[in-house]
Amino acid sequence: MTPRSLYAIAPHLSRAECEAITRKVLGFSTADECRVSINSGMRQNTRFAVNQVSTAGDDYNASVTIRAVVGKRVANVTTNRLDDASLRAAVANAERIARLAPEDPELLPELGPQEYKESIAWSDATASLEPEARAEAVRAITSRSLQAGFVSTGYLEANAGSNAVANSRGLFAYARSTAAAYTTTVRTPDGTGSGWAGASDNDFRRIDPRLLAERAIDKARRSMNPVAIEPGRYTVILEPTAVANLVGLIAGSLNARGADEGRSFFSKAGGGNKIGEKVVDERVTLVSDPLDPRVPANTFSGDGSPTEKVTWIENGVVKNLAYDRFWAQKTGKAPVNAGGSLAMTGGTSSMEEMIASTERGILVTRFWYIRGVDPRTILFTGLTRDGTFLIEDGKVTRPVKNLRYNESPIFMLNNLMAMGRPERVSASESGGPGQAIIVPPLKCRDFNFTSTSDAI
Amino acid sequence: MTASRREFLQQSAAAAAAAGLASSALAHPVSAAPPIFQGDPSHKELVLRAIDAAKAAGAEYADARISSARSQNIGTRERRVTNIGDNETFGFGVRVLVGGAWGFAASSNLTPDEVTRVARQAVAQAKANRAAMVKPVQLAPIHHPPVPNGVWRSPIRIDPFTVAIEDKVAYLLEANAAAMAAGARFVNSNMFFLKDEKTFASTLGTVTQQTIFRAQPGMTVTMVSADNRDFQTRQSTDIQPKGLGYEHVLDNDMKRHAARWVEEAKQKLTAKPVEVGRYDLILHPSHLWLTIHEAIAHPTELDRAYGFEANYAGTSYLSPPEEKLGKFRMGPSFMNILADRSAPGSLSACGWDDEGVAPEDFHIVKDGIFVDYQTTREQAMWLDWWYKQNGRPTRSHGCSYAQTWADVQFQRMPNVNLMPGEQDLVWEDLIAATENGIAIIGDGSFSIDQQRYNAQFGGQLFYEVKNGRITGMLKDVAYQIRTPEFWNALDMIGGKRSYELGGAFGDGKGQPAQSNAVSHGCPPTRHKQINIINTGRTA
């Protein structure tokens, strides 16, 4: 859809404005070192429920974080009052608190000026999505749902903003980014069926509300009156959203220090970490690349260090874990920033082929209320939701009641049978843009379902 | 507050003080002197300006909130401070109703011109939203006259922002040292404080100024096995977050508890893996509050029951309301669920909610039967038929809340509490009465489906109970329940003396997702024949 106006870009601080603020703050600083971080922008959202807009919001915020270093003592102060007196007070407060803090034995000097690649995460179309255009996108779903006699609920969020980092050693980084997500849950009026569809992108024009409406309505219709099946180990075909719900969890453990300290799945028996070890099927490769046009992310991290492409797992083998500057220095490694986005390689199987080759299995739309159970194995629990179907003799035969799983994405990726083409998805539980993630649909054996749920 | 509730709280406070309990919230009665708002007095003019601008632009109803919130977080590990952060956020939001449709806009730029612009923006947005409207919003009347000068303040003794940073750092590092001395492999500790000064005005003539405090000290001890193949943690769940000041930190000195937490984490490394099966569960208040939160408090939110949260938080098994209210048996006849925003030191306590309604205590479950939902002014109208049928006025229970100035207010849960039983039973009595059970202390892993039927909970500590005695520690324990059956399997409940407040800052709901802070009071309980699974797997 076309936004109403491409001229009304959501307010955010420009590079020049960020330069001016950081110069001013660094000028107020009397600390040995100072870092200034700025975040600004608009969050624009519209919600709907029972086929009409329920609430909406447009909010602007800009905040500045000052990190003052006095000797080896550090403190951070954040404020969203950007007048001179408030900024001066925030600097003074940061320095006062820093002087009272104990020395930090792990403190490293601020970085000097760095080279950055230009971020590609901005879209004018997302930044100019006004309430009228959002209401129109809502009608694209509610009108179809009404026509079908169903009840639609959904959420559209479009964010646009900038962030900057500068320090007293002359480093300056600035980037703008946008992110949009649109999700809908369509239920049958009798409450026996529920279908979900969602999409996320930096560019709202790549999200098609009509397609979301059709998918969610179709799933709601097909999911009516599900039957209960025995929990147990099943072959599953996971749509890309369900895959992202689980594979995204690995990112949280990709940290060298936790692994070296013995408190992570990536810890090695006897000491050290699993870099170089094969942990999942050899068809699996996981990469974070801020310049991947499918899932762009920021090109610098919070301390101003450039974020490069990192391969975490290549052909099933752990290639990299994130090292902060201190841990890298201590262990004689190069620093590696955590990834802002995540991409998993895919295969060539179509969903139809995966279904046709399955004698008995379960097709999953998405997972919900995913919470950690055992960090030793990245074991999580959660439930299927809004479209769960039984596959028998190569065909989707009927809807089934939702199931709770206790499973690890590591085990799942060891039980891999087939992979489809990667797709960018909306995988955050709350329906916000969340992490940019692109993953394929998967077919896996022996997925561990532990109980059934009556929830629809 | 009802007389019986006030009496109960006073008794609990006395009992808590006498027993020297960790949960000291009840030991701080509200001060008799009326509180004074110490925030910026100019905020009152600005909120009035906002609602005037909204009215002039065509709003039939408007409210405005200015919030100046300060938070502080101090984090440590072992002998090192990992973070000291001071955060202030300041801004305002304007909500308007135009032709029955809501609009909301917010900004951090608090100038008179921006206040007018944002109020108009909210009206313009409401007009855009009206285009897709099917049924206009109606607001229930407020049961009390407008409050032109309302002032409320959390009943704290020590403002955390007046306590020196070095004292806070010393407190945490001493607690860490105690853990290290007891043999901890790793220890992380932290404290978090919030002070939120909120000024509110609505077109009904209410203007309130409230100062809300919250405090949470916490510690996690980690032990790693000698061969690096296993690690276990113990979180300090016996100290729960409260709507209190720095006294909450001082009253719960972590260094006194650290050695015990280390010992418990060590025991977890060698604990016996649980055998799957059905057991009688004995749940400590430091654990049970979370089960109440997930399996009673969330499904009794009225917007969920009507499908408004279907796209994220979900709907509810307590739906449709006309089939459940007054009919659905939640549990045994001694089960009573009372909601409040009045318990001193609780996280949800306030003088007025975020649409200017003075909250009231109300029963959600009475004598085991489900009787009411949590409501706002908009939602109370949806239950007009039920209140009329019962000869009660149709009015909000005062459950409107927004996490910050930038977020629109909507229905959020108050403190939802399981009331103690008649008999004077305590934790040890429940264990002594159990033949074959598992006792669980502290909240851990949690997950529940979108209608709140199927839930799974872990915990911090699990003990095998045989013939009335604790016979050893278990690990890899989680219980899976179907909510209605779980509450109907409740067969023993602690008395007033064993009642404690648990709670959380991170109660998520809404889109964009907002965090609510809420407490849940409860005594220990026993539930017959609950399904236990073993969550341990080998990588």
Image (cartoon, helix red, strand yellow):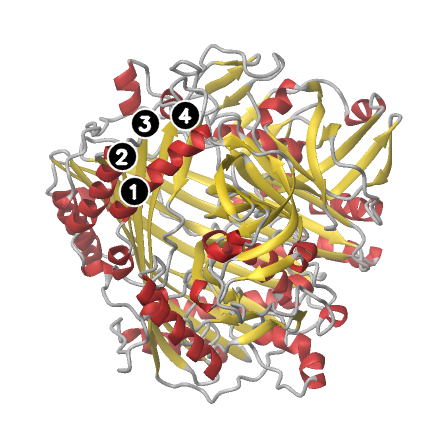
**Which residue type carries mark 4?**
Asn
Whether residues under marks 2 and 1 lie with C-beta atoms below 8 angstroms apart, the answer is yes
**Which residue type carries mark 2?**
Ala
Q: State the CA–CA distance, disc 4 to disc 2.
A: 27 Å
Chain of the residue under label 2: B
* Residue under the image location 14 percent in, 50 percent down: A92
**Which residue type carries mark 3?**
Ser
Q: Which residue is mark 2?
A: B182
Give a yes or no on whether discs 4 and 3 share a subunit. yes
Q: Which residue is mark 1?
A: B258
Q: State the CA–CA distance, disc 1 to disc 3.
A: 37 Å
Q: Which numbered disc, 4 or 2, marks the residue closer to the eye?
A: 2
Relative to B193, residue A99 above or below: above
Q: Secondary structure at mark 2?
A: loop
Q: Which numbered disc, 3 or 2, marks the residue closer to the eye?
A: 2
Q: State the CA–CA distance, disc 3 to disc 2.
A: 39 Å
Give a yes or no on whether discs 2 and 1 share a subunit. yes
Q: Which residue is mark 4?
A: A255
Crowdedness of circle 4 by 10 Å Cα count: few (<14), some, many (20+)? Answer: many
Relative to A79, residue B531 above or below: above
Crowdedness of circle 3 by 10 Å Cα count: few (<14), some, many (20+)? Answer: many
